[in-house]
Image (cartoon, rainbow, N blue to C red):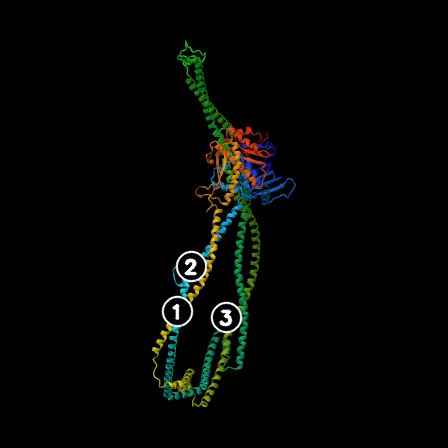
């Protein structure tokens, strides 16, 4: 993979479009990416990662804040990358998901992520679907996003953690970089097989336990099985068979005894029943002979009653006819009185006589038809009167509605006159809020700049006060240094002048002089009060050097303060702190005011919409009310005319009566009374004629039935129930006499006439005792047979289940042991799972590759040592990584390394891991890679060694980007990409060496 060109717009800290030409920048194979903290160095790497994979490394991907806060409203964050991967040159353009302000109204709307892939070599179909692009990039790169972040962007800080991590944490990182899915699948497969086997074994064992419980239950015991359940079960089966045989023998014996008692009981019951039947037959015959006279009286009574029944029926009919005739006469008189009491009815009644004739009947029918016709005509008039009443109510409602419509139209007219002014006020308020909302980004930027300038001005004032103190300290330190230096030089001069006396003090008799070599010392110089010793000179020199160091320290502090002041001056423009504070307060007030107005934009827009909707509603409502008012007026006019016509017709139909209803009621009474009178007169006349005919018929029937008078026949009548009762008594007596004689004539009854009485109680008791004994024996035999059958069935099932579980148990134990070893437990002494074993092999390859670079960068002192020992307290092993110190020969923990040594180890580990992952991914060639911060912890010699290793990385055309803010790196690497931080966003400067 080689990067060619990167273009970033509205992305992270980059508000405007910036571009990086990697072909020009990486012409030497090594370039430096540097800039101030927070300028956006890491964002350049994020842009490369986002263009390729649509995501960024680390925790930054969770923030979803890729849209630049400095960009103008409506800007679209975009990353464009031209790159060659696996020999294919292509262009990737991506835009992340972000939120933008709505074009209308307030609030924001989410824009979805977008991406395109264009083949610049002209081969292949261009892609625009994000899943298709992800699949194609994964195929070309041969590695996932996590692997790319680890082997191309080389996050030094993460590898420092990886270096010091325990086995579990180191394993989690390696699992992200190396695909161990298939080995994890094998572990999971064995685990699932073990669980399934254990479940099957438990199920089979539970079935055996259930069978043992069934055998115990069938045998009627509560204890469990012995050591061998099958032998125990067979023993219970033999015991049950013996018990069954004994129960069967006892049952046959008691059955034989019960049969004898049953036969004796049946014979006794038969004789006793025959004796009882003979006694009952003799008693019935005696009773029949005693009741002969009573039966003769009853037979005569029922015969007379049956002859008198036809006469009594006709007598009752004649009486009923006479009663009906009397009732009809009274009813005729009452109806006639009622008819006379109604106006117009007396004239009709005066023309009638009794008994009625045909002319009177025809006269009544004529009157009735006339009155019925008047009732029908008056019913129509009454219906029309009701219509008039309803119409009068409707006219009242319409007149009230007409008044209400007039009031409503007047009120709507007033509201329509006032509404345009309210709409204009709402439009101005909405325009003001919209302008305030649009101005918010600019005001926030102004407020941020003002806050930064105000803070910088306050800090500048403090820094300048501090600089004055530092400047005075520098002057004091220089004066002290000058005094110390002059003192040292003075002592040095005095020592030189008194050197003869110092040398004379070292002379010894017989020893040659250090200057002339003479062994004679005739006149050695003597020390004076001004003589200076070597110790005095050394003390003065040390004081001078200490003062010089203080001068350097003070000067460095003063230089640092000057640089800080320069930065603060750039931030605040060297303005007055109070003035800048006032500008900040003004900016904050303007921002608050705009924010408050902007927050009201939505409510003001809704208010304006409501006013406009109300204006439309008022117009529509006014038109509807005008139409309705015209319709109501028209209905009132037509309804009033119709009502007057109806009232006139009603007054005409009333005639001399108070109203049509009164007239209709009076005529209806006349018609109904005349109709009832006509029917009553006909009914009374018919009843009188029928009564006379029936009385004559009753006299004739009484004489024919043998009665002298009709009253004798009526007295002889008996109710049907009495007749049925007499017939039943006579029939029962005859049937009892016949039945008794038939029983006495039976041979068996005659045979027991002289037999002795039977003692049935003792025979029954003997039979009951024998029957109870049989029931008990049957129950015992049945229970014994059931237990034997159950035991035979369950024992057979237990034998088969016990034979089947042995091979299952052996297979499960073998599978469980193998699963434990693969999972890093059991007989696995190193506690390495299959996945850990694979990761350990990869880590060993990483350690070999990283050791070569670490040894080079540490001048042959350090190398990595991989160990596959188990972790503490049985944790998984195989992922241990320590450091060998060849100076001491000791293997020690990586946690004992210093800061600079840890950086060398982390960098070596990152490079080694990059080599192994690239090889694991099919030998992907990584022509471009980036190395993050950490060079500031190295001394000059170590930095030279590291740069030598980095020079080796660019062999073969590889481009290496160093991310650092160390000044010395800028002197060593001529090609640089400078990220410049600004108030309105960061910019890029490419410096090609």
- Give the labeled residue for mark 3: 665
Q: Is residue 325 visible?
A: yes
Q: Position of residue 606 (x, y in %)?
A: 53, 45
Outermost residue, right side: 122
- Residue 948 x/y as whole percent: 55, 31
Badge 3 element:
helix
| Sequence-wise first label, 2 or 3 | 2
Q: Secondary structure at mark 1?
A: helix
380 over 688 or under it: above or below: above
Q: Which residue is mark 1?
A: 247
Mark on residue 229? 2
Could you classify mark 2 by the number of other residues whose Cα lies within 10 Å: few (under 14), some (14-19), or many (20 or more)? many
- Asked whether 259 or 723 is in front, the reply is 259
Quadrant occupied by the N terminus: top right
Residues at discs 3 and 1 in contact (Cβ within 8 Å): no
Q: Nearer the viewer, mark 2 or mark 3?
A: 2
Residue 202: percent from the left, percent from the top?
45, 55
Nearer-the-camera pick, 132 or 491: 491
The image quadrant that residue 630 belongs to is bottom right
* Percent x, y of residue 466: 46, 26
Could you tell me how far apart the alpha carbons at marks 1 and 2 are, in whole angstroms?
A: 27 Å
Q: CA distance from mark 2 to mark 3?
A: 108 Å
Q: Which residue occupies 40% across, 68% down?
A: 245
- Mark 3 or 1, nearer chain start: 1
In the picture, the quarter occupied by the C terminus is top right
Q: Which mark is residue 228?
A: none
Question: Is 942 placed above or below 431 here?
Answer: above
Q: Are marks 2 and 3 in contact (CB under 8 Å)?
A: no
Whether residue 227 is situated above or below residue 163 in the rendered picture: below
């Amino acid at each position: 993979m080689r990067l060619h060109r990167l273009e970033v717009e509205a992305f992270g800290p980059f508000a405007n479009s910036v571009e990086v030409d990697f072909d020009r920048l990486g012409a030497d194979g090594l370039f430096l990416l540097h800039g101030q903290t927070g300028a956006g160095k890491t964002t350049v790497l994020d842009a490369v990662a986002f263009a390729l994979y649509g995501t960024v490394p680390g925790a930054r991907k969770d923030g979803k804040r890729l849209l630049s806060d400095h960009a103008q409203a409506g800007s679209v964050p975009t990353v464009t990358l031209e790159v060659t991967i696996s020999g294919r040159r292509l262009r990737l353009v991506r835009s992340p998901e972000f939120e933008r302000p709505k074009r209308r109204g307030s609030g924001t709307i989410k824009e979805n992520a977008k991406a395109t892939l264009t083949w610049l070599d002209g081969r292949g179909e261009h892609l625009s679907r994000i899943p298709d692009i992800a699949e194609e990039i994964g195929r070309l790169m041969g590695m996932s996003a996590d692997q790319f972040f680890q082997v191309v962007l080389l996050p030094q800080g993460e590898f420092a953690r990886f270096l010091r991590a325990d086995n579990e944490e180191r394993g989690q990182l390696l699992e992200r970089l190396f695909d161990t899915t298939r080995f994890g699948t094998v572990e999971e497969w064995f685990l699932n097989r073990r669980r399934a086997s254990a479940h099957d074994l438990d199920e089979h064992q539970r079935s055996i336990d259930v069978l043992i419980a069934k055998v115990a239950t069938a045998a009627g015991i509560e204890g469990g099985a012995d050591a061998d359940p099958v032998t125990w079960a067979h023993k219970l089966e033999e015991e049950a068979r013996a018990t069954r045989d004994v129960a069967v023998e006892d049952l046959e014996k008691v059955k034989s005894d019960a049969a004898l008692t049953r036969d004796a009981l049946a014979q006794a019951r038969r004789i006793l029943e025959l004796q009882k039947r003979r006694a009952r037959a003799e008693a019935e015959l005696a009773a029949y002979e005693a009741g002969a006279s009573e039966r003769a009286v009853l037979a005569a009574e029922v015969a007379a009653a049956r002859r008198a029944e036809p006469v009594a029926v006709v007598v009752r009919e004649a009486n009923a006819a006479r009663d009906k005739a009397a009732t009809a006469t009274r009813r005729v008189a009452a109806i006639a009185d009622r008819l006379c009491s109604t106006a117009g009815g007396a004239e009709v009644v005066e023309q009638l006589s009794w008994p009625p004739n045909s002319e009177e009947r025809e006269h009544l029918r004529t009157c009735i038809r006339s009155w019925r016709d008047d009732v029908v005509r008056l019913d129509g008039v009454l219906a029309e009167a009701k219509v008039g009443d309803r119409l009068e109510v409707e006219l009242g409602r319409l007149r009230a509605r007409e008044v209400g419509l007039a009031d409503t139209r007047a009120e709507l007219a007033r509201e329509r006159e006032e509404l345009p002014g309210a709409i204009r006020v709402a439009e101005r308020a909405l325009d003001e809020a919209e302008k305030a909302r649009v101005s918010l980004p600019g005001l926030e930027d102004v407020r941020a700049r003002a806050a930064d300038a105000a803070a910088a001005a306050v800090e500048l004032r403090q820094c300048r006060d501090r600089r004055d103190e530092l400047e005075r300290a520098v002057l004091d330190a220089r004066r002290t240094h000058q005094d110390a230096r002059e003192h040292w030089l003075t002592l040095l001069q005095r020592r030189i002048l008194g050197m003869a006396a110092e040398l004379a003090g070292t002379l010894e008799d017989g020893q040659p002089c250090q200057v002339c070599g003479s062994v004679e010392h005739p006149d050695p110089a003597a020390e004076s009060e001004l003589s200076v010793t070597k110790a005095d000179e050394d003390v003065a020199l040390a004081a001078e050097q200490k003062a010089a160091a203080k001068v350097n320290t003070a000067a460095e502090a003063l230089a640092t303060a000057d640089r800080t002041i320069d930065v603060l001056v750039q931030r605040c423009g060297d303005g007055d702190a109070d003035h800048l504070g006032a500008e900040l307060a003004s900016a904050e007030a303007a921002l608050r005011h705009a924010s408050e107005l902007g927050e009201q934009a939505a409510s003001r827009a809704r208010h304006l919409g409501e006013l406009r909707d109300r204006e439309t509603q008022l117009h529509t409502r006014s038109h509807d009310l005008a139409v309705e008012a015209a319709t109501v007026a028209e209905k009132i006019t037509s309804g009033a005319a119709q009502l007057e016509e109806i009232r006139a017709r009603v007054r005409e139909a009333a005639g001399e009566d108070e109203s049509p209803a009164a007239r209709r009621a009076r005529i209806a009474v006349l018609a109904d009374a005349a109709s009832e009178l006509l029917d009553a007169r006909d009914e009374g006349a018919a009843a009188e004629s029928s009564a006379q005919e029936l009385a004559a018929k009753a006299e004739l029937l009484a004489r024919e039935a043998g009665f002298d008078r009709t009253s004798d026949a009526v007295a002889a009548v008996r109710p049907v129930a009495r007749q049925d009762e007499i017939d039943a008594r006579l029939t029962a007596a005859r049937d009892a006499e016949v039945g008794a004689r038939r029983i006495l004539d039976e041979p068996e009854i005659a045979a027991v006439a002289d037999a002795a009485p039977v003692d049935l109680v003792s025979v029954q008791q003997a039979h009951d005792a024998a029957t109870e004994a049989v029931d008990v024996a049957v129950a015992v035999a049945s229970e014994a047979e059931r237990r034997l059958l159950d035991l035979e069935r369950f024992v057979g099932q237990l034998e088969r289940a016990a034979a089947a579980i042995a091979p299952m148990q052996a297979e499960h134990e073998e599978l469980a042991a193998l699963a434990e070893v693969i999972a890093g437990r059991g007989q696995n002494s190193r506690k390495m799972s299959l996945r850990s074993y694979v990761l350990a092999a990869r880590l060993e390859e990483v350690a070999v590759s990283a050791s070569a670079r670490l040894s080079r960068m540490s001048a042959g002192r350090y190398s990595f040592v991989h160990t596959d020992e188990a972790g503490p307290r049985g944790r998984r092993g195989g992922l241990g990584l320590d450091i060998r110190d060849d100076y001491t020969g000791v293997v020690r923990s990586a946690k004992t390394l210093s800061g600079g040594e840890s950086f060398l180890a982390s960098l070596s580990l990152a490079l080694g891991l990059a080599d192994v992952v690239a090889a694991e991914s099919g030998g992907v060639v990584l022509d471009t890679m980036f190395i993050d911060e950490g060079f500031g912890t190295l001394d000059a010699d170590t930095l030279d060694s590291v740069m030598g290793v980095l020079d080796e990385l660019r062999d073969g055309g590889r481009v290496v980007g160093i991310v650092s803010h160390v000044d010395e790196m800028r002197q060593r690497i001529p090609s640089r990409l400078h990220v410049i931080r600004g108030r309105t966003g960061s910019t890029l400067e490419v410096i090609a060496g």
